[in-house]
Each structure stands twice: as C-alpha cells, then as structure tokens.
Image (cartoon, rainbow, N blue to C red):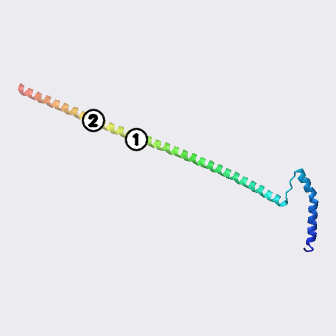
Amino acid sequence: MSLLSIPKTVVDRSLKLTRVPIDFALTAAGVKRQAPESRAAERQRERAERLREQAETERRRAAEKREAAEAGIEKAAAAKKRAAAKKAQKAKKRNEKREKSAELGKLEAREQSIEAAEEAVRAKRQADQLREATEKAKEARKKVE
C-alpha cells in the first residue's frame, strides 16, 4: 500500500462507519437505499422503457396514418370505378339509341319500298285493266262496224 492511498482508505472507512447508523434507520423504516450505480441503471431502464413506449406510440400512429391513407386510396379507386361504370353505361345507352335509330331508318326504308312496290303493282293492274278495256272497246267497235 502506498502512502497516498492510506488517507483515501481512512476517509472511505470513516464514511462507511458514519453511514451505518443511517442505513440501519432507513432499513428499519422500510426505505430502501440504492447505490449510485443501481440508481443510474434504474434511470437507464426507465429511459429505455419510455423510449420503447414512444416507439410503440409512433408505430401505432404510423399504422393509423397508413390505414387512413389506404382507406382514402380505396375510396378514390371506388369513386373512379363508379365514374367509369357510369360513363360506360352512358356510352352503352348512346350505342343502343343509335342502333335503334338505324334500325328504325331501315324499317322506314323497307316500308317505303313496300309501298312503292304496292303502288307499282296497283299501277300495273290499272294499266292491265285499261288495256283490257281498250281491247274490248276495239272489239266492240269492230263488231259494230
């Protein structure tokens, strides 16, 4: 042991001796006294626990944000899908209307051609009747002459 360490040892021992009655009193009172190292370790554990709780809270917030964003994206996609379906429905109705209009035009043209054919048949009958009538009239004149 060196001469310099002797005063340090004496002071350390005297402090321990003066602390003994206080430690007994604290132990009897039920107060637990911690060493400075254990207090620092306890503070580190508490800090680590707080940091874990903060990290968990941040994770929850991030998850909530992500879910809200996903819900917004889903709503936008659903709205877009509804708009596309509505647009397709309108286009389908326009096409059906166009097809019906074209079909109506065809039917009208067919009706006109049928009417024209009927008119032609009527005109031919009248011409045939007129021819027959003129032939009968000619024969009747020949007989009269």
Q: In which quarter of the image is the N terminus?
A: bottom right
Q: Residue 114 carries which label?
A: 2
Question: Which residue lies under the disc numbered 1?
Answer: 98
Residue at left 93%, top 66%? 11
Tell me: 109 left or right of 88: left
Q: Are marks 1 and 2 in contact (CB under 8 Å)?
A: no
Q: What element carries label 1?
A: helix
x, y (%) of residue 92? 44, 42
Alpha carbon distance from label 1 to label 2 = 24 Å
Does label 1 or label 2 sit earlier along the sequence? 1
Most foreground residue, 127 or 26: 26
In the picture, the disc for residue 74 is none
Is residue 133 or residue 85 the one in the foreground? Answer: 85
Residue 117 image point, x, y percent: 25, 35
Q: In which quarter of the image is residue 47?
A: bottom right
Quick check: 83 above or below 1? Answer: above
Of residues 119 and 94, which is closer to you in this image? 94
Secondary structure, mark 2, is helix
**Residue at the spot 78% in from the left edge and 58% down from the top edge:** 44
The amino acid marked with disc number 2 is: Ile
Label 2 neighbourhood size at 10 Å, few (<14), some (14-19), many (20+)?
A: few
Residue beneath the point at 42% across and 42% down: 95
Is 12 drawn above or below residue 3 in the view shown?
Answer: above
Q: Residue 105 occupies which quadrant of the picture? A: top left
